[in-house]
Image: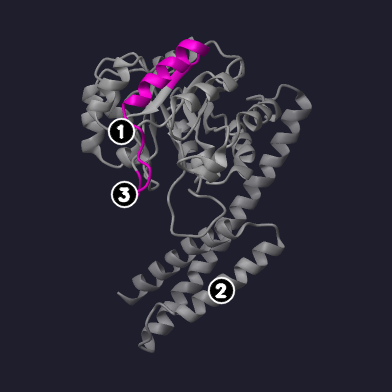
Amino acid sequence: MENKKELRNWLDAYKLDHPLVIAGPCSAETEEQVVKIAHQLKDTDVTALRAGIWKPRTRPGNFEGVGSLGLKWLQTAKKETGLLTATEVANPHHVELALKHDVDILWIGARSTVSPFIVQDIADACKGIKNPVLIKNPINPDLALWLGAVERFYTADVKNLGVIHRGFSTYEKTKYRNIPEWQIPIDLKAKFPDLPVILDPSHIAGRRDIIQDLCQTGLDLNFDGMIIESHYDPDNAWSDAKQQITPEVLIQIMNDLKVRQEKGGTEAYKHALADLRAKIDVADQTIIQLLAKRMGISDQIGKVKLENNVQILQNDRWNSIKNKMLADGDQMGLSNEFVEKVYAAIHQESINHQHNVSK
């Protein structure tokens, strides 16, 4: 897929003076609920009302959506408020029904993106449509798989495309439901700067108290908009209750968010930034030199272990290093997630060096 300006045509056609906002309940529960939320979001910065009609759950037995009946509720909400509508589709039948009920924006869920077979089936069903199709990142951090899904729709003559960054699953215990791994959408934007990127802070957060911070981070990283779960009674929502916010809170968040300039214009700004970037370059060079020195020591350790017939992996030693670095990092204002991730990479590279010595 070539990087083309046409990828942004659908977004530019909205003629917004602010980032795109898609908002609404995680799940359509009743017609009254859908229409009431739509009216609460009317005349705000929200462009499209979202609602899950079919809800694929991790385990059976949980609420899995009201089904196609909910599409009629979206139609009613659209007619009464003028908001566009958006929902997730997971198979060709969903596509057919959503289009039949005038849904404006379709999105592909993370569970679908992981399977090229499913993506191809949905792309074939969408062939040639003008509706925007937004593709969520796969559950695991795999940029190639994410881009591959986008390419399948582009090849199916779906040119109004975008992606949704909803974070990535992890076994690690973090403050996020799905860790952001910001570098992955940053790399995507570097490859395809004209492909709109929408942030899903609700699924990254898994809790409502950090949604505003995530939205601000997304704007600071030049994301094109956000899709946020909003319910007038979030604690009693039928799905994902902890991560939904009321329309009132959503409106306040939208008012408080700051859209930064892409580039500064003053000479003072340019000089200050150039000075700080020079310092970053020096610090980066020092880090590389220290890492190389550390791996040189790992080579020596590998030789000593080989000469004494000692196995490479020493769990007690690794746990001791990790715990010390976490404590030191905490004192220096570095998050545990960052320090653990950096030292896991360092430890793996050290094992690789020691293994190469033993060959």
Magenta stretch contains residue 222: no
Residue 64's place in the image compared with 324, above or below, is above
Q: Are marks 1 and 2 in contact (CB under 8 Å)?
A: no
- Drawn side of residue 28 relative to residue 20, left or right: left
Q: Name the residue under label 3.
A: 60
Q: Mark 1 points at which residue?
A: 149
Q: Residues within 10 Å of mark 1 (few under 14, many from 20)?
A: many
**Magenta stretch, residue numbers:** 57-85
Q: Quadrant of the N terminus?
A: top left
Q: Where is residue 200 in the image (x, y as percent from the top left)?
A: 50, 35
**Residue under the point 51% across and 28% down:** 24
Q: Position of residue 231 (x, y in %)?
A: 55, 33
**Residue under the point 40% across and 35% down:** 136
Colouring of the image: one colour
Q: How far apart are marks 3 and 1 (CA)?
A: 26 Å
Q: Name the residue under label 2.
A: 321
Determine the secondary structure under disc 2.
helix
Q: Where is residue 172 in the image (x, y as percent from the top left)?
A: 48, 60
Which amino acid, mark 1?
Answer: Ala
Residue 259's place in the image compared with 276, above or below, is above
Nearer the observer, disc 1 or disc 2?
1
Which amino acid, mark 3?
Answer: Pro
